[in-house]
Image: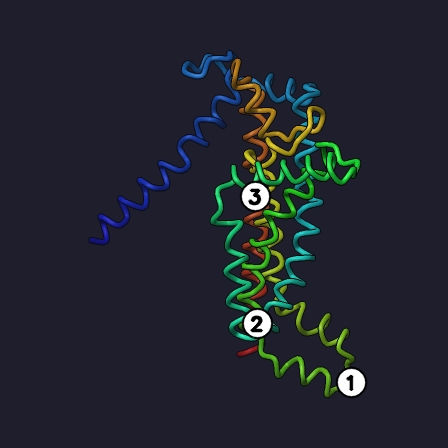
Amino acid sequence: MKRLGKVYTWLIMGFLYIPIFVLIVYSFNESKSRSVFTGFTFKWYKELFSNRLILSSLGNTLLIALVSSVFSTILGTAAAIGIQAMSKKMRSLVMNITYLPIIDPEIVTGVSLMLLFVYMRTKLHIPLEMGLITLAFAHITFNLPYVILNVIPKLRQLDHSVYEAALDLGCNPAQAFTKVVIPEIMPGIISGFLMAFTYSLDDFIISYFVSGPTSQTLPVTIYSMTRKKVSPEINALSTIIFIVVLAVLMLVNLYDMRQAKKKQEKID
């Protein structure tokens, strides 16, 4: 049974990572062929950094991901604290509403946001053109639930007597919150931020409906390129993104391990 479990695990890992490994290998392929490896080269990486369209789309993607992640983390953390302070029935109702954007198909969210922005421009006469601002608003909207759902469990684990003890020892509410509550829920805040950043980088459907002609994100640009033929430059860019994300995840895991080790040493 254990051997079968190991085989199953390796099959799943292969199914997930072999396509990425193939993509990385062909990012160094001398020709544009996607089936024959003709030789090793860094040509596509050099051309990638001279492709203005891809670099512009990458810049838009990183900017939107960073802005939306920061704002959704701040708003989501505040919302999670407010939800946790509610009564049990009200908390259950609000949490069910929070789940809706996650369960709702992305195409519905994308179309509804597009219609909302068009309505604001045409009926309310708000000068809101499809572009970076609408992209930022849309990404904040769908990132909020993920931040809330990451912070809420940490708030439930929090020992509220520690907060009260900080007040008794001379802290005002703001100091007790920043010095006691925030450090305790920080792992949830970081996880929410990273999840929001990742989803923002990866989003295509919602971005497709709310982006403008000069503010496309990288997934939208790649989709428009696939109508003709995917350039090997995309393989090179995907390889760089994969390595960066992998490095960030490893650093976060190392940080969590060190924090857990410090806590264990304090207990011992």
Whichever of labels 1 and 3 marks the residue nearer the N terminus, that label is 1
Q: Which mark is residue 180?
A: none
Q: Mark 2 packing: few (<14 Cα in 10 Å), some, or many (20+)?
A: few
Which picture quadrant has residue 63?
top right
Question: Residue tagged by mark 2?
Answer: 263
- Labelled pair 2, 3 in contact (Cβ < 8 Å): no
Whichever of labels 1 and 2 marks the residue nearer the N terminus, that label is 1
Callout 2: SS = helix
Callout 3: SS = helix
Residue 257 or 245: which is nearer the viewer? 245
Whichever of labels 2 and 3 marks the residue nearer the N terminus, that label is 3
Q: Is residue 63 among what the camera can see? A: no
Q: CA distance from mark 1 to mark 2?
A: 25 Å
Question: Residue tagged by mark 1?
Answer: 170
Q: Position of residue 7 (x, y in %)?
A: 26, 44
Name the amino acid, label 2: Lys
